[in-house]
Amino acid sequence: QVQLVESGGGLVQTGGSLRLSCAASGRSFSTLSAGWFRQAPGQERQFVASLRRNGASTYYSDSVKGRFTISRDNAKNTVYLQMNSLKPEDTAVYYCAARESDFREFGYWGQGTQVTVSS
């Protein structure tokens, strides 16, 4: 069973940066595809970024492209989301997710970490 634990959320001003971490246990992240999603109050959860199992291919939503970067550290079994140039509309609970195949739905989820961007 894969367990994911996010950390790194917090309060930041517009234009600031945060780095979210997602530590996995029970399985190596190098055998999983990883993703980040977010959910703002009153809205549905939305895709933010993903990383293929090979660790080389990344995908981003249009709203974060060029500002956010997803990466993986196999030695630490951790996936990161570096968020730069943050905007108030980035405020949400951010969730880490993992899946066993690049083409399956994400089946493993973390508990979420709050990111608040003040204007």
Image: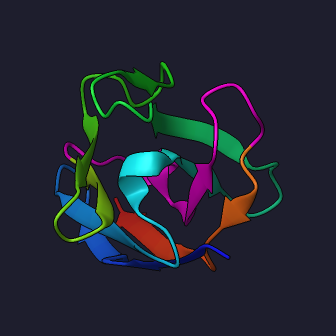
Residue 103 placement (x, y as % from top left): 69, 25
Q: Answer with left or right where residue 44 lies relative to residue 74.
A: right
Seen at 22% across and 63% down, the residue is 18
Task: Identify whether 30 is placed above or below 108.
Answer: above
Residue 86 in magenta stretch? yes
**On the rendered image, what quadrant is the C terminus found in?**
bottom left
Indicate how the structure is coloured in the image.
rainbow
Seen at 17% across and 57% down, the residue is 17
Residue 11 in magenta stretch? no
Task: Identify whether 96 is placed above or below 82.
Answer: below
Asked where in the image residue 76 lies, by quadrant, the reply is bottom left
Residue 54 placement (x, y as % from top left): 35, 30
Asked where in the image residue 39 lies, by quadrant, the reply is bottom right
Residue 4 placement (x, y as % from top left): 53, 75
Seen at 37% across and 76% down, the residue is 9
**Nearer to the camera, 15 or 28:** 28
**Nearer to the camera, 20 or 39:** 20
Task: Identify whether 94 is placed above or below 83.
Answer: below
Provide the residue span drawn in magenta.
Answer: 84-105
Residue 83 placement (x, y as % from top left): 26, 49
